[in-house]
Image: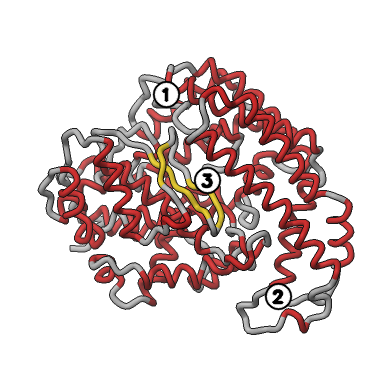
Amino acid sequence: MASTDGSDPEAADGSGSEAYDDLVERYGRATYLGDANAVLSWDQEVMMPEGGTPARSKQRGAVSAVAHDVLVGEETAEALDALEGADLADEEAAVVREIRREHERNVRVPTDLVEEISTATSEAHPIWQEAKESDDFEAFAPTLDRLLDLKRRYADHVDPDADPYATLFADYEPHLDLSTAEDVLEELRAGLVPLIEAIGDSAAEPYALAGTFPEADQLELTREALETLGYDFERGRLDTAPHPFSTGTQFDARVTTRFDEAEPFDSLASTIHEFGHANYTLGLPRGEYGSPLGEHRGLTVHESQSRLFENHVGRSEPFWKLFVDRFDDHHGTDLTPRQAYEAANRVYDDNLIRVEADELTYHLHIVLRFEIERDLVAGDLDVAEVPAVWNDRMEEYLGVRPDTDAEGCLQDIHWSHGSFGYFATYSLGSVLAAQLYAAAEAEIDGLDERIATGEFGALHEWLAENVHEHGCRYRTDELIERATGEPLTAEYFLEYAERKFGELYDLDRYGEH
């Protein structure tokens, strides 16, 4: 096993032991099965014929059950027991820590429940998609009710004494507690609401792009954006899906996007967002595949990588100095870099769709979802009430009311995946992205100039050295402090937002003049 701190793992007592080797081998088998399941899921959302769901749901359920059995099996428990108190090298101790956590959480969950959840989520995807296309929440409601019940049962098995929503949140962010997410969301709400209100009162009018931009041209442009940023098509691919996502391993990390012929900046932003995910995945240590050292460090860190590239790179003025000519060539426009920058950063507080929202109002979308999910999981909100509550809070937080459920509570795919507890990581990731980017700027000479000339190597190298190559060696808080020198804080994001949008909207209170 490789070591990044110069120590010799083989020299430590317990390193290379039969118990350790067996533990890593068994965890690897569970990982490979999970990754195979992810490919089945990707295929279902991107390539599979519509009629394939009955078989696919059984396939995915069976694979999930086998992976679960490997992870919680008696042999895994025996290996962990044998390593209790062992004198391990730092990297080995991290491996055991991460596997122990996964084992201890999952051993409490019956295999038949794991299989039922996997089957249900596979079956839910086409139901959600059809309900969205037909604007029929009632058609999805029974499925949502079923998934909530399954995930409540899952949470109760993991820890019957804990807040079930906290338990579900920990599946996506294992080392930052739910109270941290709540604090960050509250801090963002307190800082962003007055900024958004000031923007609404401003007389400034950043450039707005209008027209029709064919999907084929947008697809070519998004592919060129991926190439410009350094996406490795030898280990990835670009496809379309109802909801953009990225999935894969360090050997095969795929991205998807979607298009609106009236909004070419949206497809570009979502593709760059997914590039950030894939870039992190592809940057994980190849030699550690199948071990926690070859896995991402939770969704907060993963979302920090996507939001960093989407916003701090893809929505930056230096990027548009680099990319505006390519945009013009594909779409027949004649934009200046400044016009493109302004168009890519307009604040629309009446935007109904989260993935198309600007950097600021985006977080009010997250707050809305977070609150509704908490109430659903707690049983304080009935599924039938979701559309009305969603619309009321959309009107309260963003001043706009959806005309359809397709634009409202059916817009996101996450509930069909059973991904309750996920949404807060988008805001946590945005906060961390700003903190990481500030640290990178402090260490990389002329980062803006490098981006403006298409030189992304230094940024990729910094992210690899400070985030990607560590896998799960460090807990989330430890990784953040090692990379930035301080704990997670929303200060960098709020300062960045106030500086950027203060200048765009000519706000004396916020901008630097």
Q: Which of pointers 3 and 1 lies earlier in the amino acid sequence?
A: 1
Contact, mark 3 vs mark 1 (Cβ under 8 Å): no
Which SS class for mark 3?
Answer: helix
Give above or below for 183 relative to 419. Answer: below
Name the residue carrying label 3: 424
User: Which one is nearer the viewer's eye here, 204 or 426?
Assistant: 426
The kind of residue tagged 1 is Ala
Which SS class for mark 1?
Answer: loop
Mark 1, Cα crowd under 10 Å, few <14 / some 14-19 / many 20+, is: some
Which SS class for mark 2?
Answer: helix
The kind of residue tagged 2 is Asp
Name the residue carrying label 1: 406
User: Which one is nearer the viewer's eye here, 304 or 245?
Assistant: 245
Q: Which mark identifies residue 90?
A: 2
The image position of residue 117, as x and y in percent, is 69, 33
**Which residue is at a point 28% across and 70% down the rendered structure image?**
450
Q: Please, which residue is most extreme toward the left here?
A: 334
The quadrant in which the N terminus is found is bottom right
The kind of residue tagged 3 is Ala
Q: Which of pointers 3 and 2 lies earlier in the amino acid sequence?
A: 2
Does the rendering let one see residue 160?
no
Mark 2, Cα crowd under 10 Å, few <14 / some 14-19 / many 20+, is: some
Mark 3, Cα crowd under 10 Å, few <14 / some 14-19 / many 20+, is: many
Marks 3/2: CA–CA distance:
31 Å
Q: Which of pointers 1 and 2 lies earlier in the amino acid sequence?
A: 2
The quadrant in which the C terminus is found is bottom left
Q: For this view, does 276 lie left or right of residue 478? A: left
The image position of residue 503, as x and y in percent, is 21, 56
Give above or below for 467 relative to 426. Answer: below
User: Which one is nearer the viewer's eye here, 43 or 417?
Assistant: 43
User: Which one is nearer the viewer's eye here, 226 or 263?
Assistant: 226
